[in-house]
Amino acid sequence: MSTSLHTRACNDPAHAAPPARERVLIFDTTLRDGEQAPGCSMTRVQKLRMARVLEELGVDIIEAGFPAASEVDAAAVAAVAATMRRARIGALARCQAGDIVTAARALESATQARIHLFLATSPIHREHKLHMSKAQVLDTAVAAVRRACALCGDVEFSAEDALRTEPEFLIEVFNAVIAAGARTINVPDTVGYTTPAEIAALFARLRREVVGIERAVLSTHCHDDLGMGVANSLAAIEAGARQVECTVNGIGERAGNAALEEVVMALRTRADRYALDTGIDSTRLYAASRALSGTIGLEVARNKAIVGDNAFAHEAGIHQHGMLANRATYEIMRPEDVGFPHTRLVLGRHSGRHALRERISTLGLGIDDARFETVFSEFKTLAESKREVLDADVEALVLGAAVHARGPWMLAALHVGTYVGGASIASLHLRHVDGREARETATGSGPVHAVTAALVRASGLALEIIELRVRSIGLGAGAQGEAVLRVQHDAQELRGRGTSTDIVEAAALAMLEVVNRIERTQSRARANPTHPHDGNSHHDDEARHVSVA
């Protein structure tokens, strides 16, 4: 009786569990292919730090390096292999005996290891790089796979420049290496040459014609030379690839690789189309992006998909109006899903009345309709001369103060020195409008670090710098330096900007702008404790997640 009821329940669609979705393995090669890009090299310590970030992110396979390239790279791979415990650790090797042995040694301490073999198969590589015939390429690949399988239980084979290889020969090579023991077959678009339709057709053919393909995982590895790395990767996945090789921020040789964050969020956001899962914790994507940027010193483009500063920022008035009503009007994913704290409405020349009203309300500033129209007119004039109108500017407009006025604290003196070895010390003197003075000294890893640390100590506020960017405005002896920073204070994000011919002073002025804004806000709160500070109370739940800071 109980068995019959159980059977009926399992067969009843109303009681059946949703079918398990297939999994796409994320093979991250930030530490190998990504690091090969000019300006992206990493030390052993940096690789180890990034490997921890990747493991926390949920990457399935971390390709830690190319051990045969140098003793330094071999040591880095060994350090990553000895430390990581959840992710599988891969090491790249040419189809040469020495490379394979070196890779195996570097992976000895890994809980899970993979040797990743590669050999070019395209006519242009066979003729000009390898000087090998088809038969020689085939024999070399098979011998290498067998040698690697004797040393490691997980072997991947990549046919370098596969998308420019004759499909019939590619199938012949894959037949042979699967028979020799390879369990992952990678089909790289090494030079970013293919198109989505072309790569999908190739993967469909490989699934039909490669003997033993059911025993192997088909993998895609796409470069971005024509700007189609992610699109080609997704097309390959639709056609049967179940491993995608990618990098954080899309770094890599030449124009880079398919970006991990873009592939992952495309699969997640368009689950209706792909119905596939990854093991990635998407809420860590932004942090991983910034960790890599900080490690290699390569700034993430503001318009970079998923993790760029503008990915969840809106300036156009029509867009801002829609976002304040319901953010689904212009956002296809939630910023918190990728680790952004919130959407940001940027005030600039394209902004309209709705966004400015929201910003004024959020700042806790009272204003009637007549005064608002005057402020809005002044705001538009200011926005024509500034790339972004910050909260301090809005305060000044509403309160009738000069936009460029600073206070209540002013920078009276600043001195910065550098020790032998790179450490810096900053001493500053602040003067308050009420006559108070503050003097503070701090050390840092560089002059900007030292001066911001001194300002934090002088203010007595709990401030955490999230991001600091510096750039030159113009050229020549009179060129101005601009510093823009984002600071966390009491769970609120604040922004400051400073300009000066001295970039260290510009950083100090940017931090001082934040400190002054906090003090002005606290002064208003003490003077008018009953003022309602929640400027979003009249919006729905969606709008409450839209920040106008």
Image (cartoon, helix red, strand yellow):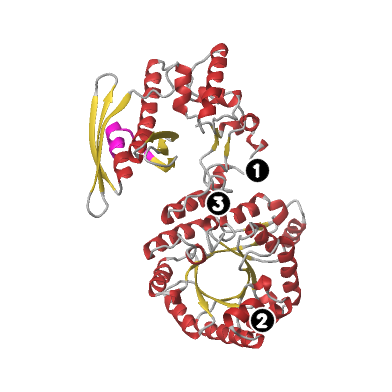
Whether 276 is drawn above or below 473: the answer is: below
| Residue located at (60% from left, 30% from top) | 350
* Three-letter amino acid code at the position of disc 3: Ser
In the picture of the structure, the residue carrying the numbered disc 1 is: 332
**Which residue is disc 3 drawn over?**
282
**Mark 3, other Cα within 10 Å: few <14 / some 14–19 / many ≥20:** many
User: Image check: 70 left or right of 153?
Assistant: left
Whether the magenta-drawn stretch holds residue 71 is answered as: no
Q: Is residue 300 left or right of residue 263?
A: left
Horizontal and vertical percent position of residue 99:
48, 80
Give the left or right position of residue 533, taking residue 184 as reference: left
The amino acid type found where label 1 is placed reads Ile
Q: CA distance from mark 1 to mark 2?
A: 42 Å
Displayed quadrant of residue 343: top right
Label 1 neighbour load within 10 Å: few <14, some 14-19, many 20+: few
Q: What numbered label is drawn on residue 173?
A: 2
Q: Is residue 463 above or below residue 85?
A: above
**Could you say whether the residue bearing mark 3 is in a helix, strand or loop?**
helix
Residues rendered magenta in the picture: 454-464
